[in-house]
């Protein structure tokens, strides 16, 4: 295998990154929300790029854009390897979260084409639909669909503009229907692989090229509804107030204190964030009567999650009493922690050694499509460093060389999977 990174490779990666970066809300770069016009334009460009790379394209029932490099075998239903990530972004996000993984997956295809290598399995290059948290309160739409985790309750959700989630998925080419079982050819899937920026600092700090991901943390999201009483800010006395925002402030402070205590005590990743809050009526001369907030939990272990939640419930009871407000908590989404496949971790580590790419084992705090893919097929993931660990912001940055190095590891892993598949077939 050719381990050197050709200038043409980094130039192509840079072009992919720069081209996709043009599809953004102009006044809020980089914003390419799922189902937006920017997203649809980016999808059109990506489909053309997939076809130009020799892939046969379709949008599957879950709304994923899939480019297939057909196997050399004439078997009716050959084995498959999935390779991909996502091109949707958070609001005012970066140019690399997800996109680096799609660019790296395309580099694997270019390597195979340039070296005229035909694999003994189909290689599916995937842009998974809607990985980022959306206005419907869920995320990883396409990979959840593949894993059989899209329910009618989710599809019926309506956003503030009246758009129904199921209708939006159908509008961009998916079925818009539920998915209660993993994809029917799951037993034929040898591996799902994803490259992603680390979105934290450890690889950059250790000056390492690649992190072999050991597990993806569980993600749990809850809506917090606080109901007090709106009132005149001048005439409502301090003692008679039912101020929903003050109750929210108690909860926000408390969540941070509990999470710091658990994260400090537990040697596994734990984080809790209230990053979205809406105040009603939200007027300077009005005592806030209603607050809607979202709690985002990341837990590598169920133990720490359950610990947190017990204390969180006490905190809400306390805030409800002391502020005389009604507080309702509702679970919006849950994805259990996902350990990566041991064999794929070994293959990725070996591929890194063989290609002279420095690596270490790593776990992270972010959610990824690969967590859902791991529910029905062997899944593996690698991180590449990003500058200052920044992500979900315009300052997010990594180099085309870093992406190219990561793609070498993916290529090495895919070639070893091909060698083993051919052996088992022989
Ligand atoms: O929220 C996450 O961890 C991912 O970036 N969607
Ligand atoms: Mn991502
Ligand atoms: Mn993200």
Image: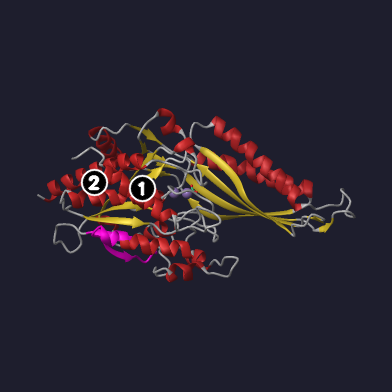
The circle on residue 176 is none
Whole-percent x, y for residue 331 in the image: 57, 54
To which quarter of the image does residue 357 belong?
top left
The colour scheme of the drawn protein is secondary structure
Classify residue 112 as left or right of residue 145: left
* Whether residue 374 can be seen here: no
Residue drawn at x 52%, y 32% is 266
Q: Which picture quadrant has residue 149? A: bottom left
Q: Mark 1 and 2 residues: CB-CB less than 8 Å, in contact?
A: no
In the rendered structure, find residue 14 and report the number of the disc placed on it. 1
Residue 355 image point, x, y percent: 24, 35
In the rendered image, residue 67 lying in the magenta stretch gets the answer: yes
Q: Nearer the viewer, residue 103 or 311?
A: 103
Q: Is residue 422 left or right of residue 194?
A: left
Per the image, label 2 sits on a secondary structure element best described as helix
244 sits to left or right of 80? right
Residues packed near mark 1 inside 10 Å, few (<14), some (14 to 19) or many (20 plus): some
Tell me what residue is drawn at x 48 percent, y 57 percent: 24
Q: Residue at x 26, y 40 (%)?
A: 5
Name the residue nearer the viewer: 99 or 174: 99
**SS for tag 1?**
helix
What are the residue bounds of the magenta stretch? 49-69
One can see residue 301 in this view: yes
Q: Determine whether 349 is above or below 54 in the image.
A: above
Residue that label 2 marks: 414
């Amino acid at each position: 295998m050719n381990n050197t990174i050709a200038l043409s490779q980094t130039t192509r990666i840079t072009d992919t990154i720069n081209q996709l970066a043009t599809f953004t809300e102009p006044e809020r770069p980089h914003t390419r929300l799922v189902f937006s016009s920017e997203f649809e334009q980016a999808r059109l460009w990506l489909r053309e790029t997939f076809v130009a790379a020799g892939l046969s394209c379709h949008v599957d029932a879950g709304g994923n854009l899939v480019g297939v490099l057909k196997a050399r075998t004439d078997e009716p239903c050959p084995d498959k390897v999935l390779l991909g990530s996502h091109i949707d972004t958070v609001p005012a996000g970066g140019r690399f979260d997800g996109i680096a993984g799609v660019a790296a997956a395309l580099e694997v295809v270019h390597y195979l084409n340039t070296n005229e290598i035909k694999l003994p399995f189909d290689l599916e290059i995937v842009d998974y639909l809607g990985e980022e948290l959306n206005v419907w309160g869920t995320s990883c739409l396409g990979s959840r669909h593949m894993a059989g985790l899209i329910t009618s309750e989710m599809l019926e959700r309506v956003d503030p503009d009246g758009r129904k989630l199921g209708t939006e998925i159908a509008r961009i080419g998916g079925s818009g229907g539920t998915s209660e079982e993993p994809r029917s050819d799951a037993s034929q899937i040898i591996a799902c692989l994803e490259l992603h920026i680390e979105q934290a600092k450890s690889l950059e700090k250790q000056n390492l090229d690649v992190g072999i991901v050991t597990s993806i943390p569980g993600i749990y999201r809850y809506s917090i509804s606080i109901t007090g009483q709106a009132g005149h800010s001048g005439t409502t006395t301090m003692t008679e107030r039912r101020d929903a925002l003050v109750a929210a402030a108690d909860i926000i402070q408390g969540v941070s204190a509990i999470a710091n205590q658990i994260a400090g005590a537990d040697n596994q990743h734990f984080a809790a964030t209230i990053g979205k809050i809406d105040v009603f009526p939200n007027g300077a001369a009005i005592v806030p009567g209603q607050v809607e907030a979202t709690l985002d939990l990341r837990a590598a272990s169920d133990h720490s999650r359950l610990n947190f939640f017990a204390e969180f419930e006490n905190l809400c009871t306390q805030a409800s009493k002391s502020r005389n407000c009604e507080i309702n908590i509702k679970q919006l989404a849950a994805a259990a922690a996902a350990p990566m496949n041991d064999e794929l971790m070994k293959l990725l580590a070996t591929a890194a050694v063989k290609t002279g790419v420095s690596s270490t084992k790593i776990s992270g705090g972010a959610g990824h499509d690969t967590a859902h893919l791991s529910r029905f097929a062997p899944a593996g993931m690698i991180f590449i460093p990003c500058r200052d660990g920044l992500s979900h912001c315009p300052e997010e940055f990594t180099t085309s060389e870093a992406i190219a190095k990561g793609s070498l590891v993916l290529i090495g892993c895919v070639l070893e999977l091909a060698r083993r598949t051919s052996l088992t077939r022989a």
